[in-house]
Image (cartoon, rainbow, N blue to C red):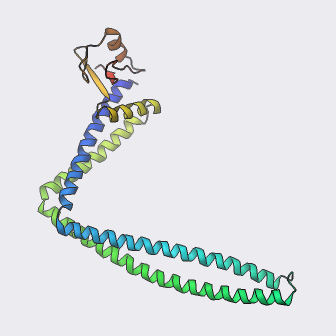
Amino acid sequence: MNLSFNLYRLQSIDTQYRKITRRLAQIEQILLADETVRAANEQKMLAEEAERKIHSEIKEIQARSQEKKIKLELHQKSLFGGKVRNPKELQDLQAESEVLRRNIQKLEDEQLDAMLALETAQEAFKEADLAYHRALDKKASENSLMLGEKSKLEVEQQQLRSQRQALTSPLPKQTLDEYQALFKAKGGRAVAEIVDDCCEGCGVQLPPADIQAAKSSGSLAHCKTCGRILYKA
């Protein structure tokens, strides 16, 4: 496996992917710039937050109810287990059990109300989501050329993901980590091709030993000036 060649190919894929990602973000901003779309998106987010809040409330009610049910079960075991014989203690356990039953019933009523509220919230979110996509589709139809570009770019993006996965799978983790760190640090240019015995990244003239090392298939050579990985076609 020629590491520098594979990393050079990977860099090409990553560069294309980053370019597509930026363009898709620009298109999304343009589509969302429409006031109707933006308002619909805000309503959708509000509806989603309301649904999430009710979900949390239901979980809290269920936890509290379960806690009291466990406590009630322990009281019942004490009442009928024969270990507690003191009448006063038995009377207190019975009274506490009744309080627990009432509290459990109250929590179950609250849970039922919350479930009904959740259904309403879910329906509101569906309607808000539908309204948002309608507004988005309307805006997109007004920008049909842009929509076509968006679809094409999304397909290309998926293809690049698959190509990247196939290319990175056999690479050693340490090599991939080094490449990714350089790609970030060097502005998307981690691998520099050797052109006319010079590093294409910084332009410095390379010694013959470095050029020969760059041709090695099993190891990586680096430019001593800019630190980039060297690749010789």
Q: How far from the left and from the top, in percent, is residue 220?
A: 39, 21
Q: How far from the left and from the top, in percent, is residue 49?
A: 38, 70
Q: Is 68 placed left or right of 191 in the picture?
A: right
Whether residue 31 is visible, yes or no, is yes
Q: How far from the left and from the top, in percent, is residue 82?
A: 86, 83
Q: Is 93 placed left or right of 45 in the picture?
A: right
Identify the residue at image location x=35%, y=10%: 209
Q: How far from the left and from the top, in percent, is residue 94?
A: 75, 89
Relative to 214, does residue 165 appear above or below in the rendering? below
Whether residue 172 is visible, yes or no, is no
**Residue 86 falls in which quadrant of the image?**
bottom right
Q: Nearer the viewer, residue 225 or 129?
A: 225
Identify the residue at image location x=76%, y=83%: 76
Q: Nearer the viewer, residue 92 or 193?
A: 92
**Residue 196 falls in which quadrant of the image?**
top left
**Residue 195 falls in which quadrant of the image?**
top left
